[in-house]
Image (cartoon, rainbow, N blue to C red):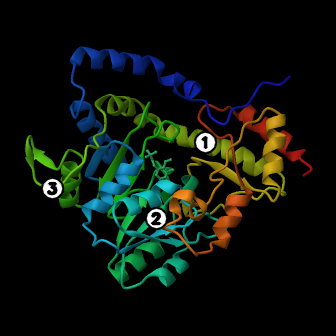
């Protein structure tokens, strides 16, 4: 019986960093400083440097990175934020938690990312922002999106949870908009060993405000200037992220090499992600579309290959969204939800693993 090829294995993923992580934890225990210390400040600086930006604020997770970005803008209650209809639910939750109205816009069926032409059609006098999501590791088409935002005086918030190190026209995800919101959930291309997140801000004013918001609205201990939250990046997670950040490009290159194998070897019955020289995709997720997706998933499981679906239920079909996303139809995103399958493509996989996946997949007769 052949060995299982997992979709992801966090233990294997972090094995190359094990010694450094253990030493870091030991230093951390010796130091006895747990919240907002040198490690968070150093990670913020290093994450800014990686992006060629000035201002990063470490926060508790990716959802909070989105919420604090929106809160920072002080949008009027009930105003509208444009968001892709096929995103992960967190992006939409952030909008709802800020008492704003999510306006879902369909993606391009080949890039899976929000369609700039459809953004234009969705703008009303109540629109205040566009929340783009660089889904699966590929940047959105930022030039037309920024143009639309500028023409209409809209803020741009980038959800970069799946796009660490991804580029569009050679510019990094998170550096286009007013805010770049990141998640360092353990499976992300840059993953912590627990929850963690960050916001890259374009302006110093926003940077200072998000720093305040993440820490009870406090600029100075026991002085609360705004109604804030507790959403601090953990000192220990920051120290782990500092170990892994220098390897982010290597992790991305590895995933791109695995993606190349899929592109080269998978037969034409599987619809593969669109390739375009403007985009440097970091394949947080390598997905294909197939009309018999569920049968294919089961077939692969029978052959000891684990896969995932991102995502099995569209946001408008989630029970939690009953009072928020009613009466709208999103045929493109519905089709993606029905046919998408995410294949193993992690830093922990070998080229041999992926060749084996393609070999088995090409024998699928449907
Ligand atoms: C697109 C997207 N946005 C936001 C988030 C939320 O990140 P977190 O789980 O760190 O809160 C995720 C997490 O998976 C995500 O994929």
Q: Are marks 2 and 3 in contact (CB under 8 Å)?
A: no
Q: Image height check: is 352 above or below 212?
A: above
Identify which residue, 21 or 209, lies in the foreground: 209
**What separation in Å lies between label 2 and label 3 (alpha carbons)?**
27 Å
- The x and y percentages for residue 46 are 31, 40
The numbered dot on residue 65 is: none
Q: Nearer the viewer, mark 3 or mark 1?
A: 3
Residue, disc 1: 255
- Relative to residue 67, is residue 93 drawn left or right? right
Q: Image height check: is 322 above or below 55?
A: below
| Residue that protrudes farthest toward the right in the picture | 365
Q: Image height check: is 15 above or below 198?
A: above
**What separation in Å lies between label 1 and label 2 (alpha carbons)?**
23 Å
Q: Dot 3, how many residues are within 10 Å of its Cα: few (below 14), some (14-19), or many (20+)?
A: some
Q: Nearer the viewer, mark 1 or mark 2?
A: 2
Residue, disc 2: 132
Local secondary structure at mark 1: helix
Residue, disc 3: 226
Q: Residue at x 41, y 37 (%)?
A: 195
């Amino acid at each position: 019986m052949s060995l299982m090829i997992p979709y992801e294995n966090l233990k294997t993923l972090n094995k190359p960093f094990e010694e450094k992580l253990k030493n870091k934890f030991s230093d951390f225990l010796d130091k006895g400083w747990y919240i907002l210390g040198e490690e968070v400040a150093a990670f913020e600086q290093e994450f800014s440097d990686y992006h060629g930006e000035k201002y990063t604020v470490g926060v508790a997770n990716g959802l909070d990175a989105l919420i604090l970005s929106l809160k920072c803008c002080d949008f009027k209650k009930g105003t509208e934020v444009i968001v892709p209809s096929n995103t992960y639910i967190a992006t939409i939750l952030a909008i709802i938690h800020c008492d704003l109205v999510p306006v879902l816009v369909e993606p391009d069926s080949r890039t899976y990312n929000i369609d700039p032409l459809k953004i234009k059609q969705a703008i009303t006098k109540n629109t205040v922002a566009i929340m783009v999501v660089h889904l699966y590791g590929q940047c959105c088409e930022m030039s037309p999106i920024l143009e639309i935002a500028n023409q209409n005086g809209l803020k741009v918030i980038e959800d970069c949870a799946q796009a660490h190190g991804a580029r569009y026209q050679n510019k990094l995800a998170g550096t286009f908009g007013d805010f770049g919101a990141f998640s360092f959930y353990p499976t992300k291309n840059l993953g912590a060993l627990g929850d963690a997140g960050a916001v890259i801000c374009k302006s110093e004013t926003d940077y200072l405000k998000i720093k305040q918001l993440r820490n009870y609205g406090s600029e100075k201990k026991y002085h609360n200037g705004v109604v804030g939250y507790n959403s601090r990046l953990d000192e220990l997670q920051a120290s782990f992220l500092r170990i892994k950040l220098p390897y982010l490009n290597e992790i991305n290159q590895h995933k791109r090499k695995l993606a190349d194998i899929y592109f080269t070897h998978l037969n034409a019955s599987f619809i593969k992600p669109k390739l375009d020289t403007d985009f440097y995709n970091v394949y947080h997720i390598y997905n294909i579309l197939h009309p018999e997706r569920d049968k294919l998933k089961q077939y692969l499981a029978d052959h000891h290959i684990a896969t995932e679906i991102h995502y099995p239920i569209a946001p408008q079909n989630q029970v939690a969204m009953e009072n928020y996303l009613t009466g709208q139809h999103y045929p493109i995103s519905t089709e993606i939800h029905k046919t998408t399958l995410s294949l193993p493509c992690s830093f922990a996989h070998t080229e041999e693993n992926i060749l084996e996946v393609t070999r088995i997949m090409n024998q699928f007769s449907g």
